Amino acid sequence: MALNEPAFSIGIEEEYLLVDRDSLALAEAPAEMMEACQNELQEQVAPEFLNCQIEIGTKVCRDVNEARGELQRLRACVSREAARHNLSPIAASCHPFSDWREQKHTDKDRYNTLSHDLGGVAQRMLICGMHVHVGIEDADRRIDLMNQLTYFLPHMLALSCSSPFWQGEDTGLDSYRLTIFDNLPRTGLPPRMNGFGDFQRSVDVLVDLGVIEDSSKIWWDLRPSSKFPTIEARICDVQPRLQDTVALAGMTQALARMLWRLAVNNQRWRIYDRFLIAENRWRAQRYGVREGLIDFGLGEVVPMTQLMDEVLELVQDDLAFFDSMDAVTRACDIARDGTSADRQRRIHAARREAGGDDATALRAVAQHLIDEFHADL
C-alpha cells in the first residue's frame, strides 16, 4: 500500500431547510429562487429530496480557512435569494414543528425513483445533514483510514447534534435525524474491509442484481465517495453556526492525517468491534455531549470535555500543518457549553418559563435557528 502523502483536501456539503419568515413553518423553494441560486453558484447548489430543502457544496479546499470563505459565500447567496421570497434557510437537521406529511418531494427522476424504492420510509425524510470529504487518492488507503476513523464517528456526532425536536415534540434525543435516517437500507457504521476490492466486490453484487445503480446508494456514516477520490464522513447533523461546521470539518481532516501519520510509522489505531462503536454512536445520538462516551482502552465512560482535550492533543501536529488550530478548538467549547440541541432546548424552556405556550416556544426555536444561520455571514 503506497505511503505517499495524500492531498487531504476537503469539501463540505450542507443541506438546509427553507422556512417562511412570518409563520416560521417550512415552505417550498420557488423555481425562481432555485434558478437564481444556480445562476450564481452553478453546480455548487442543487435541490434536495424535499421541495423545502436546498443543498450546497464547497469547491475543493486545502484547509478549513479556505472552506470557511466558501461556506460564507454559499450561505449568503442562499439567504439573499430566499429573502426575495420572504423565506429564510435554517441549518438544523430537523424542523422544530413542521409535519413531514405536508411536504412533497422534488419532481426529478432521481428522487421519484428514490421515493418508489423506499416507500413510506422516504416520506419521512424531513432531515438534513452535512458531509465532509477528505481527499485520499489511493483507493486502498481510503479503506484503511476508514477502518480506523470509524472509531471517532460518535465523537463527531456528539458535537454536531442539532435535531432534538420532531413535529413539535421534544424527542429526548439530541440527534433525532439518525432515527429517521437509520430506517433506510445501507446506512449506519461501515463494515470493516480489507481493501477497496472488498468494497467494490460488494457494490458490484448489488449493481449486477439491479438493486442499486452505483455506490452513491451506499449511505454509511463514512464511505468512499462514489464521485471523488475521497472518504466522505456523513455522520454529522448539519450545523446552524458556520463556525461549528468549520470545526467539525477541520477535525475530520486532522484525524485522517493523524491516522495516516501512524501508518508512516508502521502503527495504526486499534480497530474495535462495530458493536462497541455502535454503543458510543447511540450515546452520542441520545445525549450529545452531556453524558460522555466510552473509552474502550480505559474501560470507562469519559466526559466529552476530557475526550476533546485528548483528541486535540492527538492531532495537534496536523492542526498546525493545516493552520486550523483556532477553528478546531471550537470543539472544546461545544463539549463544554453544549450543542445546537442544547441551545434549542434552552430557548424553548425560557419561552415557556416566560409564559408562552408550546407553539410560541417552538416558533422561538425556529427564529433562533434563523438568527444563528446569519450570525457569521
Image (spheres, rainbow, N blue to C red):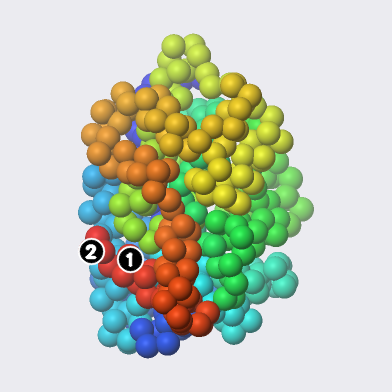
Residue lying at the far right of the rendered structure: 209
Callout 1 touching callout 2 (CB < 8 Å): yes
Q: Name the residue under label 1.
A: 373
Q: Name the residue under label 2.
A: 377
Asked which secondary structure carries label 2, the reply is loop
Front residue of 191 and 225? 191
- What's under tag 2, amino acid-wise? Leu
Image quarter of residue 174: bottom right
Quadrant including the C terminus: bottom left
Is residue 112 positioned above or below 309 on the image?
A: below
Front residue of 254 and 49? 254
- What's under tag 1, amino acid-wise? Phe
Label disc, if present, on residue 116 of the rendered structure? none
Image quarter of residue 315: top left
Image-based side of 151 in relation to 257, left or right: right
User: Which residue corresponds to the image point at 44% horizontal and 53% vertical from the top-left?
Assistant: 339
Q: Is residue 118 visible?
A: yes
Residue lying at the far top of the rendered structure: 266
User: Which residue corresponds to the image point at 41% horizontal and 20% vertical from the top-left?
Assistant: 261
